[in-house]
Image (cartoon, rainbow, N blue to C red):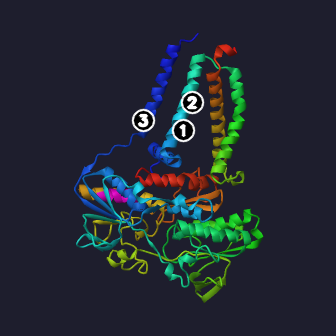
Amino acid sequence: MTNPIATRRQFLGLAAGGAAAATLADTRRAQAQTPTSARIVIIGAGAGGTALANRLVRRLAGAQITLLDPRVEHLYQPGLTLVATGLKPAKYVTSKTTDWLPDGVTLIPEKAAAIDPVAKKVSTDSGQMLDYDFLVVAPGLILDHDAIEGFSLDMVGENGIGALYAGPDYAARTWQAASKFTEEGGFGLFTRPETEMKCAGAPLKHTFLIDDIAKKAGNGSKIDVNYAAPQSALFGVPIVAEKVRMLFKDRGITSHYQHTLKAIEAGAKRATFQTPEGAVEIDYDYIHVIPPQRAPDVIRQSGLSWADKWTDQGWVECDMATLRHLRFPEIWALGDVAGVPKGKTAASVKWQVPVVEDGLVSAIEGKEPTETYNGYTSCPMITQVGRAMLVEFDYNNDLVPSFPGIIAPLEELWISWLMKEVALKATYNAMLRGRA
Amino acid sequence: MKDLTFETLIAVFEEIFGRGLFWFMFVAAVVVTIAYLYVLIRDRSISWRKFLLAQIAMPIGAVIAVWFVLAMTHSRLANIGGPVDLIVLLGVAAGGAIGSAILVYTIQSLIRAPSSEE
């Protein structure tokens, strides 16, 4: 016979233990706040600006933090490749900018119109003037679609034209054009720009995915997949470039090196490339356009850009380890706009944010910062639906695997696909909230 | 991954399922586990008859778990590409098997008192 009262007491004890464990899991690492009255302006409330704001409000007490960003929608850009292949709907990548911002910061829904780094002032579109003690420039970059002659965004989705970088709706329209190609076949032309770009793996992923979807639909014999790049290699990191070259060979994808897309004729479905041998015309049934990418005009006009590097692109002149501006020590660059050799990905932002946070808080406290950015970039390089390679590297082009011996970086794995498909957005959102 | 701490992991799971659903599932798992421990303590022994039925549920739970994960992630078994993939797949199957066994055993024990059975 069991005593019901005794067992109930035991039961309640266990339940209480469980609840205590749950509470423990929810406690945040408490960090002492630094009191300050500093005025901090963050230009851009994208991945970098938002994550930084969330971390700064936890580190600083009394700081006046202002974000400038006219965009109502926040974009989860790593999801665009999935939208452009019909694996996720367009709304998968959108949320509201204000959903992620902490209490105690001010969002001005306007663009920065001008920055005066000497007088330490930022003016907005409507003429509002903001004085700052510290400035973080994180406005992202500009997709220069006008640089491709004959191309405009309203063409996306029709006549075999795709452009997934342009945003969620354009990514969905890209899938309209691309899915037609996977069914009807023809000559597929996948391009990338010669400038620095967001996630250099994305053009390759789109190529791999469209090729895979066509083949799995039984239309492999109808497609001729071609990848055209201005560079002489398929990826900036040599060991990854070689692996992709082998995969392309395996899949029957033809590479065209030193081909820079200059113009398209949508009606005739003809693309013009600049090559060392002169202009080359290629007829296509499907083309994926990724335009040249540059820093926003406000950055280039304010004198924050490098004077001797990327002069046609205007990335912010900053130290590659601390991300601090080389001429204006109260300014940091964060995210796509930073003039560093690598790192225009969300994964890089995740590594950069703690560095800028440390630099800024140390400057307020009058201490030497300790955190540095090593160029870490990560790219779950999708090679087919269901498999990816978890490629991670740094400034030196060294592979820096997070799970050495467990997840091989140059192996096509299901677990790497799972990371992209399931865990990545979750990690990204946790980063936005300043918790990862 | 940078700073892969327990806290980060919780944050990631909260984001995958949504905060409400994650903690609901967490609490559900805790409740089932506590209920399981409760019936073990109450009965002071394992009922091998109930355990047999629970064991029969194991392969079903394993298959359902694998099917669920593959369906949720646009994957197929052919995507298994390396040893770590196989380990993950077996882990999912094992999780489904053990979970379903505990669930079936606990439900049986709760709806049927030990005295009426033996």
Q: For residue A312, which quarter of the picture?
A: bottom left
Q: CA distance from mark 1 to mark 3?
A: 15 Å
Q: Which residue is mark 1?
A: B25
Q: Is residue A231 visible?
A: no
> In the image, what residue occupies the spot 67% across and 47% down?
B86
Residue A23 tag number: 3
Badges 2 and 3: C-beta atoms under 8 Å apart? no
Q: At which x and y percent is residue A56?
A: 33, 54
Chain for numbered disc 3: A
Q: For residue A31, which quarter of the picture?
A: top left
- Give the magenta part as a residue range: A352-360
**B102 left or right of A430?**
right
Q: At which x and y percent is residue A307?
A: 36, 79
Residue A85 tag number: none
Q: Which residue is mark 2?
A: B32
Q: Secondary structure at mark 3?
A: helix
In the rendered picture of this protein, how many numbered marks are placed on residues?
Answer: 3
Q: Is residue A253 visible?
A: yes
Q: Quadrant of the C terminus of chain B?
A: top right
Q: Residues within 10 Å of mark 2 (few under 14, many from 20)?
A: some
Q: Residues within 10 Å of mark 3 (few under 14, many from 20)?
A: few
